[in-house]
Amino acid sequence: MTLLEIFPSLRAAMAPRLDPAVWPITTGHDDRGRIRVGGVALDDIADQYGTPTYVLDEDDVRHRCHAYRTAFPEAEIAYAAKALLIRAVADWVTREGLSLDVCSDGELAVALSAGVDPGRIILHGNAKPAAELRAAVSAGVGRIVVDSHTEIRLLSSLAQRRQKVLVRATPGIDIHGHSAVTTGIDDQKFGFPLTDGHLDAAVRLVLEQPNLELVGLHCHLGSQISDSSLFATAVERIVAQMGRIRREHGVILTHLNLGGGHAVPYLPGDPELDLTGLARVVDDALDDACARNRFPRPALTLEPGRAIVARAGVTLYRVLSIKTVRDGRTFVAVDGGMSDNPRVALYGARYDIAVANRHPTGAHTAMTVVGRHCEAGDVIARDVLLPTDLHPGDVLAVPCTGAYHHSLSSSYNAVGRPPVVAARDGRTRQLIRRETVADLMAREAGL
Ligand SMILES: Cc1ncc(COP(=O)(O)O)c(C=O)c1O
């Protein structure tokens, strides 16, 4: 008999360290060495709901909301729903005092059906169809961020009463991140550059519309930003524009929306945006810019998405097969892949990964975890350390998969999308059920 068999609690003590920076706050091990989230063994969730499955730690989501409310007691925090929108999530974040930023009529419908106050909803998007604008005005959405001259005219013609709007500005700030998520520079599709009169022409046009009330400016610099000083530069530039708008048009804008993009770590050691530091830097920048431009301090809105939900999510997969190829690389194939996590293929994202159903005690070696889809680029984690005794049937858990996973998922290869299961206080609750082949077939028009 081994020591571990005599003292099972030793397993929990010896279990590999799961970095709290990337795993949900309630992560731990049970006395069999299995990983637990929200008080439930991930292995049990895999058995009950099948794999792949997205697990969501409700306490983690609420904890992130609370951290924002504490760091920014006077600012409006509008959760960017594109990161993950499910009715339950809309309910949790709004109960924690957050507003909601939506970017389609679909997201708007989910938010409204969760009972979110339309006055606390902000609608975004670089190309909003007429039906979407119509749905937003008839729901009474609080603010709409306008992004083109056509849209400004269209919205004015659709508005049933004076609609509050912000103009999306492009402050010319390069976050030096992935080009797909760099949105503060002039050469991309969002917003109006501050240069060459683009922003001014949009502001003028809004002010000419009888049904629109210009209340502020909005910008979003991009995603995964860990340097707070970039937000200070944005404040400086946007408040300077607000000062100019007052001088030239006699209008005092009262809202400054700085967007989201706050960095979270995906791997141990990755940088993270420090909220307390951000609060201080933005506060100082607002003081300076308002004093310099003799402009009254506008109300501040931040729109974090990833920073609210990324770390709450863990994706579970079951190992289907393991093979080693000629150069010695070992491929571990699982039952999900790029349909539930396209971020590796899209952005070259990297992930931590762990065996969830047992405590692996033996040697570990580098392996590459791949999906089941028909592309060689269908990779989940490259060169990660996994136990040499890994075998088909083992459950793998990938942390930091709460943001832009369910919302970016597809049914590629006619593989249905995974369920989303919330875990809290030792209980699970299915928030979204698994998409079945019957669901996919139901969209077919027939022969
Ligand atoms: C306008 C706007 N606000 C907020 C966000 C949220 O970004 P993140 O999830 O990186 O915080 C995005 C993301 O694309 C966005 O476009």
Image: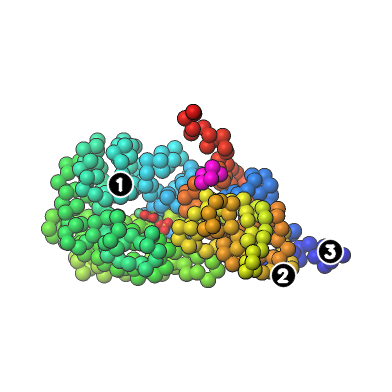
The residue tagged 1 is: 127
Indicate the quadrant where residue 234 lies: bottom left
What residue is pinned by disc 2?
A: 363
Principal secondary structure, stretch drawn in magenta? helix
Residue occupying image coordinates x 60% and y 60%: 369
Asked if residue 433 shows in the view, the reply is no
- Residue pictured at 63% horizontal, 61% vertical: 331
**Earlier along the polypeptide chain: callout 3 or callout 1?**
3
> From the viewer's perspective, is residue 331 above or below residue 152?
below
Q: Quadrant of the N terminus?
A: bottom right
Distance between the Cα atoms at labels 3 and 1?
Answer: 64 Å
Around disc 3, counting alpha carbons within 10 Å, would you say few (fewer than 14), some (14 to 19), or many (20 or more)? few
Which dot, 3 or 1, sits closer to the camera? 1
- The residue identified by callout 3 is 6
Residue 177 seen in this snapshot: yes
Q: Could you give the CA–CA distance between mark 2 and mark 1, rounded to whole angstroms?
A: 53 Å
Residue 297 percent coordinates (x, y): 26, 61
Q: Which is nearer the eye, 144 or 395?
A: 395
95 left or right of 17 in image = left
Q: Residue at x 78, y 62 (%)?
A: 8
Q: How far across and down, in percent of the image, does residue 128 sit?
A: 31, 44
Q: Is label 2 or label 3 in front?
A: 2
Give the extent of the magenta segment.
411-415
Identify the residue at the far right of this view: 1
Give whichever of 113, 49 is nearer the camera: 49
Residue behind label 1 places its C-beta within 8 angstroms of ligand 1:
no
309 vs 324, left or right, is: left
